[in-house]
Each structure stands twice: as C-alpha cells, then as structure tokens.
Amino acid sequence: MAFLEIENVYKSFGKTDVLKGVSFSLEKGEVLSIIGSSGSGKTTLLRCLNFLEKPDMGVFYLNGGELFNANTQYDDHELRQKRLSFGLVFQSFNLFPQYTALKNVTLALDLQKIEKAKKLGKVTKAQKAEIYAENEKIAKELLSSVGLEEKMGNYPCELSGGQQQRVAIARALALSPEVLCFDEPTSALDPELTGEVLRAIKELKSSDRTMIIVTHEMDFAKHVSDKVIFMANGVIEEVGTPEEVFDNPKSPLTRAFLAKSEEVI
Ligand SMILES: Nc1ncnc2c1ncn2[C@@H]1O[C@H](COP(=O)(O)OP(=O)(O)OP(=O)(O)O)[C@@H](O)[C@H]1O
Ligand SMILES: [Mg+2]
C-alpha cells in the first residue's frame, strides 16, 4: 500500500457533481502536481483532503491505516485530529493581519500544545512560557528556512505578497503535517514574486516531505514533480510522470489544455 491512497472520492454541491470518482496514490517524499482548467475540481479535491469539505463518498489511507471513510461519522475533535495530517497553503495567504510573521507561525502550535497540556491538568504560567519559547524557536527556524529571518517581527501588511506566502508556508510546516498541500500558491502574486515562492517550495522537497501542489505554473510542475495529474470535469483524465504528461500526453483533453497554456505564456 502506498503512503497516501485516495480512493474514489465523489463530491457534489447541490446538483453540481464536482468530483466524480477521484483516486490516486503517492509515496512518502513524492511531489504531486495537479493541473487542469478552471472549474475542473482541483480546489475541491484539496479541500476534501483537508476536511474543509466532506466528500460524499471516498476513503483515504495514510501511512498504512484508514484515515477517513465517508461512510463513518466523525466528531469535531476527531476531524481536527485528522486535519493535522494535511497542511494547506492557500492562494490568498490567509495570514492573521493583527499578528507578526512570527506569531502567525507560532499561534496554532501554541494553542495545540496548551490544549494538550491542559488535558494533563492545570497549566501554570511557567509551563506556558516554556511552550511559547519552544514554539518561537521552531518558528524562527522555519521562517529562516524560507528566507525570512529579517522579517519575523513584521506584520503581514509590511510584507510583500511573496513574503506573506512564505510566512504561510512556514505556518503550515509548523504543525508538521504528513502531507503539505498548496492551492495555486503563486497565482495571487506579481510575476516577479512568483519565483521566490516557487524556489522556497522546491527547497522543501525532501525524502520525508510529501507534497501536493495545484498549480498553473507548468514549468515548475514539470521540474519539481514526481507525478502529475491532469484533471478535467471532476475526473483524473491523465496521470503520469512529468515527462509522460507534459512531453507525451495521451489524452486529447490534456493535449488541448497544454497547448492552450503555452499560448498564454
Ligand atoms: N461551495 C461550493 N458551492 C457550490 N459550488 C461549488 C462550491 N465550491 C466549488 N463549487 C463548484 O465546483 C466546481 C469546481 O470548483 P473548484 O474550485 O474545485 O475548481 P478549480 O479546478 O479549483 O478551478 P480554478 O482553477 O478556477 O481554481 C466549480 O463549478 C465551482 O463552481
Ligand atoms: Mg482552484
């Protein structure tokens, strides 16, 4: 069994069938790019993987065990726990404007660790201070790893779009998700800022970091991915290595999509 197995995901909104039986698998440390035209269901798929939407059907397996089954009812606590397996970096950064870059990265970690400590009894001020210090250290390392050591004390409004997106990446990494997902991480950026974010994502590639990237950056997808999925009308129209999908696409729909995206470039 692969590290991540997604089986037969269906999702409709009212009468609109958006995902119509999506299945794929990924090994640990692999990078999957998902490409496809607007409205094909890419964001919906990522939102299902992150439990922001509930699939109507489907089963997810992670690390050898069943993580999610659409036929099972989970309570809020269970869903929150499951959600920790996946990190999601949004197109529009979604940083908290009232907090510094550092606080944006530590916030969820602080809450998580304090909640955990509370289960063991009353949390003292000293314990809290220790948790905050520990998380600051983690956040500083993560922010440095995305090239933001100079900007930790700045607020989102004082950062460029590319810098804000790199804070969002550090924030997603802070919770150590097993799979890190990106939904068009550069599409809200000016072209000159796109490169710095793509470089930061590329540098995250490592043997134990599994990533799923929805992107319109075909060149990036070609160079960073182990696997590429082309989605059309709620199904996986084609899947393969970057060479297979980009250089030798089998489906006429894939060929038409790639020809169109070349025109845009
Ligand atoms: N919450 C919702 N309610 C109703 N319809 C929705 C909802 N979310 C998505 N849809 C519909 O699902 C379809 C797929 O949307 P989705 O956002 O997944 O596409 P996408 O492939 O990410 O497109 P894009 O490249 O433009 O981001 C669209 O027809 C959209 O209108
Ligand atoms: Mg989308």
Image (cartoon, rainbow, N blue to C red):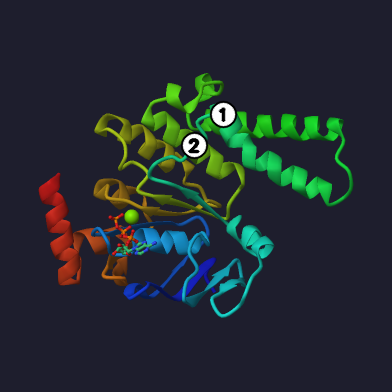
* Residue located at (58% from left, 52% from top): 177
- Identify residue for label 1: 99
- Is 93 or 151 nearer to us in this picture? 93
Q: Amino acid at mark 2?
A: Leu
The location of residue 36, given as percent across then percent down, is 26, 60
Q: How many marks?
A: 2
In the image, 15: left or right of 152?
left
Quadrant housing the C terminus: top left
In the image, 262: left or right of 209?
left
In the image, 245: left or right of 165?
left
- Identify residue for label 2: 95
Question: Is 45 rendered above or below residue 166?
Answer: below
* Residue located at (32% from left, 66% from top): 240
The location of residue 214, given as percent across then percent down, is 36, 54
Q: Amino acid at mark 1?
A: Tyr
The location of residue 223, given as percent across then percent down, is 31, 48
SS at badge 1: loop
Using the rendered image of the protein, determine whether residue 132 is visible from the camera's viewpoint: yes
Question: Is 135 rendered above or below residue 177?
Answer: above
The location of residue 77, given as percent across then percent down, is 68, 61
| Label 1 with label 2: CB-CB less than 8 Å | yes
